Image (cartoon, rainbow, N blue to C red):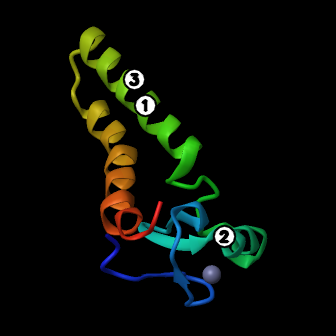
Amino acid sequence: MPDKMVICEKCSGVIKHRDDLVTAVLIYAVVPYHERCYANDIKGAKSFILNNQPLNGFSGNLVVILSIIIAFLWLLFNDSKWFSILVLLPISYRLYSYLIYEIHTKK
Ligand SMILES: [Zn+2]
């Protein structure tokens, strides 16, 4: 059950449904948007500091799956471990987005 309200970064309105929620990385923080508001911000001045790759939805999940595969292959064929830490970053962002915002919206 949604117990915490998710507030849109642009219009300060409540985001109730997961379908309407877009999370993205703004500089270094994960911020929630309405789908419509995200589209407006990405076209506006914020496009310089707003990552135009949403964290949630199909593309976000695809990035996570690819990251896991790359990290796994890297560990198999390479001795250096620092790269796999870099790969963990998109996975952490995705998890954060889910736990902080998506879990509080209705499916
Ligand atoms: Zn909004």
Q: Are marks 3 and 1 in contact (CB under 8 Å)?
A: no
Residue bearing the label numbered 2: 38
Q: Which residue is mark 1?
A: 65
Amino acid residing under circle 1: Ile
As drawn, 55 above or below 78:
below
Q: Nearer the viewer, mark 2 or mark 3?
A: 2
Residue 75 x %, y %: 25, 18
Task: Give the residue at x 73% y 67%.
Answer: 39
Q: Is mark 1 within 8 Å of ligand 1?
A: no
- Foreground pick, 101 / 46: 101
Quarter in which the N terminus is drawn: bottom left
> Residue type at mark 3?
Ile
**Disc ID at residue 103:** none
In percent of width and height, residue 101 lies at 39, 68
Residue neighbourhood size for the residue with mark 3, other residues' Cα within 10 Å, grouped as few (<14), some (14–19), many (≥20): some
- Residue drawn 57% across the image and 42% down it: 58
Image coords of residue 9 (percent x, y): 54, 82
Label 2 residue near ligand 1, CB within 8 Å: no
Q: Earlier in the sequence, mark 3 or mark 1?
A: 1
> Residue at label 3?
70
Q: Secondary structure at mark 3?
A: helix
Q: Is residue 21 above or below residue 11?
A: above
Q: State the SS at label 1.
A: helix
